[in-house]
């Protein structure tokens, strides 16, 4: 059979005339995919918070339905019009428009532009790459940005917020692997041991990471911060950074708001660094994947991983939307 006539299974999110959204697994054809240079037979994807937003009708992420979410995909190239990418190669595609308005990794095939494709680094399996996925990539990019600001192990505690989530748990593990003294802030007291097993030296509650005093500056506690939640927790973290310290900001799981004065910046020379994984340039992207597969490779990766099938996605989408998931959820598309 011509590859373009192949049928495959995909999660499809549909909108009813009343504006409600539903999800089901449907058979689709490779012919239905948008034009593109590279056709990939997806073996694994992963579940990120953004996928759950796309899968529940969030127009800020996905404008048109029916749609197949999945911002992450890893698989084998089945057909390529590009001289840069060959059929049979193992590849990773994360970010850009994948799973947003381009059918994503929650289907067994994707077709994408060649310049979205990263070759699977040595010493990393397709499944392993999706344990990291966008969450692990974002955590690694955040750590890299802190290092570029001069943060070195031994300078003091590094705070990770939303620590039991995908980006948070990856950040705890990568920072610990890189030798930092990690303080994990989590709303889930039952995950304290999990975070310690990942490498956190101390676990604090979300309440301890908040501040209700209204003061513009707080006692300096953190040499650096990886924030994944935004809102009052990020504001309190910025007010609590040592002189000259740096904070990365990648998410808004708590809130997109940030109520601050300029004092942390003009009196303590604090630096706030925005993190975007989706449109990260290819040279940086490749360098980060090499670090993930090399010096920052997490020893106990399975500790933070669960594997689910396409059919189980529905229930996990609800769990991540409710902040109830810990670690990373890999989606197998092998059958
Ligand atoms: N900028 C980028 O390129 C990029 C890339 C990936 C993700 N993100 C963003 O980063 C954030 C985390 O993504 P993820 O995939 O790691 O999601 P996730 O697995 O759901 O983790 C988010 C964590 O945040 C904490 N949290 C949830 N609701 C909260 C609330 N109301 N108040 C305070 N903390 C709360 C929870 O951790 P605890 O229970 O441990 O506190 C939760 O596990 C999301 O906003 C996502 O959109 C951005």
Image: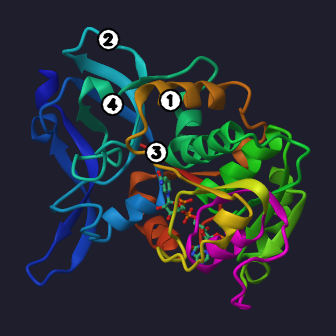
Residue 147's image quarter? top right
Between marks 1 and 2 in the image, the one whose residue lies nearer the viewer = 1
Is the N terminus in the top left, top right, bottom left or bottom right quadrant?
top left
* Residue 30 falls within the magenta-colored stretch: no
Q: Which numbered marker is on residue 277? A: 3
- Please, is residue 193 above or below residue 223 in the view? below
Q: In which image quadrant can residue 289 be found?
A: top right
Local crowd size for mark 4, using a 10 Å CA cut-off: few (<14), some (14–19), many (≥20): some
Q: CA distance from mark 1 to mark 4?
A: 13 Å
Q: CA distance from mark 1 to mark 3?
A: 10 Å
Badge 4 or badge 2: first in the primary sequence = 2
Q: Is residue 178 visible?
A: yes
Front one among 107 and 201: 201
Determine which of the numbered discs, if any, sits on residue 116 in the image: 4
Up/down of 226 relative to 109, above or below: below
Give the CA distance from mark 4 to mark 2: 14 Å
Distance Cα–Cα, label 1 vs label 2: 22 Å
User: Considering the numbered disc 2 on the image, is that residue within a helix, a strand or a loop?
Assistant: loop
Mark 2–mark 3 distance (CA, rounded to whole Å): 25 Å
- Residue 317, image x and y in percent? 44, 66
Contact, mark 4 vs mark 2 (Cβ under 8 Å): no
Residue bearing the label numbered 1: 284
C-alpha gap between disc 3 and disc 4: 12 Å
Task: Describe residue 192's horizontal placement relative to residue 269 as left or right.
Answer: right
The residue beneath circle 2 is: 86
Q: Earlier in the sequence, mark 1 or mark 2?
A: 2
Whether the residue carrying mark 3 lies under 8 Å from ligand 1 is answered with yes
Give the mark, 3 or 4, whose residue is nearer the N terminus.
4
| Apparent side of residue 192 relative to residue 60 in the rendered image (left or right) | right
């Amino acid at each position: 059979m011509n590859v373009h006539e192949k049928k495959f299974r995909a999660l499809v999110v549909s909108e009813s005339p009343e504006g409600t959204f539903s999800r089901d697994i449907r058979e689709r054809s490779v012919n239905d995919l948008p034009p593109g240079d590279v056709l990939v037979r997806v073996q694994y994807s992963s579940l990120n918070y953004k996928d759950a937003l796309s899968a529940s009708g969030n127009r800020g992420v996905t404008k048109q339905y029916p749609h197949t979410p999945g911002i992450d995909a890893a698989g084998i190239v089945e057909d390529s019009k590009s001289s840069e990418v060959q059929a049979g190669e193992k590849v990773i595609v994360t970010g850009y428009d994948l799973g947003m308005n381009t059918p994503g990794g929650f289907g067994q095939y994707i077709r994408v532009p060649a310049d979205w494709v990263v070759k699977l680094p040595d010493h990393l399996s397709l499944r392993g790459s999706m344990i990291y996925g966008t969450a692990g990539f974002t955590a690694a990019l955040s750590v890299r940005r802190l290092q570029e600001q001069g943060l070195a192990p031994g300078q003091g505690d590094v705070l990770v917020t939303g620590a039991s989530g995908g980006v948070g748990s990856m950040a705890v593990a990568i920072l610990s692997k890189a030798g930092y003294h990690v303080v994990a802030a989590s709303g889930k007291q039952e995950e304290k041991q999990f975070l310690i097993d990942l490498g956190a030296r101390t676990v604090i509650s979300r309440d301890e990471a908040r501040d209700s005093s209204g003061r513009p500056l707080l006692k300096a506690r953190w040499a650096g911060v990886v924030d994944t939640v935004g809102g009052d927790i990020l504001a309190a973290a910025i007010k609590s950074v040592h002189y000259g310290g740096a904070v990365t900001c990648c998410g808004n799981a708590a809130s997109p708001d940030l109520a601050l004065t300029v004092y942390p910046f003009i009196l303590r020379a604090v630096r706030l660094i925005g993190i975007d994984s989706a449109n990260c340039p290819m040279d940086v992207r490749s360098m980060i994947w090499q670090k993930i597969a090399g010096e920052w490779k997490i020893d106990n990766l399975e500790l933070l991983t669960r594997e689910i099938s396409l059919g189980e996605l529905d229930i996990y989408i609800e769990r991540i939307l409710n902040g109830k998931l810990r670690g990373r959820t890999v989606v197998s598309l092998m059958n």
